[in-house]
Structures are given as C-alpha cells and as structure tokens.
Image (cartoon, rainbow, N blue to C red):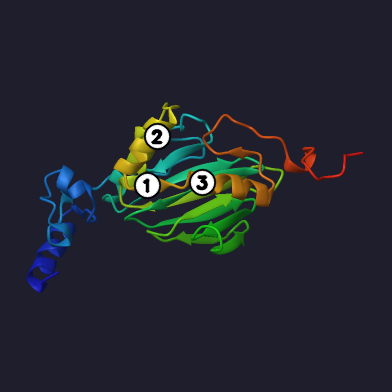
Amino acid sequence: MKRRGFLKASALSTAGFALAACSESSADEGGGGEGCDTLRLVTPVEPRIVGVDERELLDDEDGRYKVRAAEMGNYWSLMELTLAPKQLLAPHTHADYDQAVYLIEGELGFEFGGEGGTVLSGGAGSYVIKPRGLSHTFWNPGDTPVRYIEMSANVTFERFVDSVQGVDDMREIDAAAKEHGVEFHYDQIARLMLQHGLTSVKGSAIHLPRLDELDLPGRPPRP
C-alpha cells in the first residue's frame, strides 16, 4: 500500500473503524473487486466472551460456529468441531484460502497431496497448517471423539458451510463446493478407509463395518 493510503487507513482505524481483509466479499459488497488497493470499512463489533455452548449449532450437531468472519473484518472465521471415532473427513482442496486446525482433545491423522503425499499426525495441543491449493484430508484413528478448532482465512469457507446446511443431496453439495472454491476428491476415500481402518465419512449417514471384521477373499476365517 502506498504511504499516503496507509496513513489514511491508519487514521480511519484509529477513529473507530476496522479495515476489512481483501477477500471475495469485496466485490460482493461494493469493494469493486480491485483487490488489496481498495479496503472496505466495517464497523467493529463489541468485545465479548463466547461461552462453551454459545453460537449456532451446525445441522449435523457435531460442532458450532464460534467466531464469524463478519466479526473479524472478513479476515478469518473459527468453528469448533468434532470427528467421530474411526471417521474420515473427505479429501478436498481449497483453491484460494489457507486453513489451520488446533486439536483440543484426541489425535488426528493427516494426508497432504493425495496418495504418496505427506502423512502426519497430531495430538492435543497441536496446530496443523493446511495450505491453499494442496489437497488434504484427516481422520480420527482412535475410539473416542476428537475435538478440534477449524480456522479459515477470509469468509469463503464459512459461506460454503452455510450453503450446505440441511442439504443431503451430494450433487447439490458438490455444486456448492465448486461455487466456493472447494474440490472434493471422492476417488481417494476407499483407499484412505482401507489404509486406516475407518468406518464412516464425516457428513455421511453411511457407516461401514470395521475392515478387520469382514470375511474378505483370501483372508483366513475368523475364529
């Protein structure tokens, strides 16, 4: 930003305004779509504490919005979520925004870059960075639910989640995902579930039997 523009922005901020981050919302709300050279002014929110059971419950009741993007100048949003035992979050890629996960309770496995990519694991207290443009997925390998915080840059992911609340049709979900810069990689799900002994996919009502309980071809009969 040019010096004169920076000084003007600083003065406005000091006067009681917050400067919104550059995001897709700039074009939507009168920013002109000119990127970071045009900053949109938003009225700052009141300070407050958000309690454990406060804020909107997601429709599958596995988490809540905790901090909305509009409360942070559209810089970022924050959700607190859970992942059930032996459950997979479907692999996907975010085209133009970064995310990070903070693990509150439990352990998650992560894969970046698809098959043959980087596999990591993190326990309670870990922060995991998920860069834009890189496919990623994670799963709960344990027998108890994992609690985690999802932090997303700008407002795009929040809008995607809003758009699919109460939607069960996968074609509608996929269309909404593409509209908000999310691409799912469904062809990777079977491999991931086989590799990690998983039994369900987050957001799906389908539950699968444990693989070690199946009588598969070539496997000796179970006692």
Q: Which residue lies furthest to the left in this view?
A: 4
Pick the residue in front: 62 or 42.
62
Q: Distance between the residues labelled 3 and 2?
A: 16 Å
In this rendering, the label closer to the viewer, 3 or 1: 3
Seen in the image, is 111 located left or right of residue 135? right
Q: CB of mark 3 within 8 Å of CB of mark 2?
A: no
Residue located at (16% from left, 51% from top): 41
Question: Which residue does the numbered mark 3 point to in the structure image?
Answer: 187
User: In what element is the residue under mark 3?
Assistant: helix
Residue located at (31% from left, 46% from top): 156
Q: Which residue lies furthest to the right in this view?
A: 223
Pick the residue in front: 168 or 195.
195
Quadrant placement of the C terminus: top right
Q: Where is residue 167 in the image (x, y as percent from the top left)?
A: 41, 27
Disc 2 packing (10 Å; few <14; some 14–19; many ≥20): some
Q: What amino acid is found at the position of numbered circle 2 in the picture?
A: Ile
Question: Residue 163 sits in which quadrant?
Answer: top left
Q: Is residue 42 visible?
A: no
Question: Which residue does the numbered mark 2 point to in the structure image?
Answer: 173
Asked if residue 36 is positioned above or below residue 193 in the image, the reply reads: below
Disc 1 packing (10 Å; few <14; some 14–19; many ≥20): many
Question: Which residue does the numbered mark 1 point to in the structure image?
Answer: 182
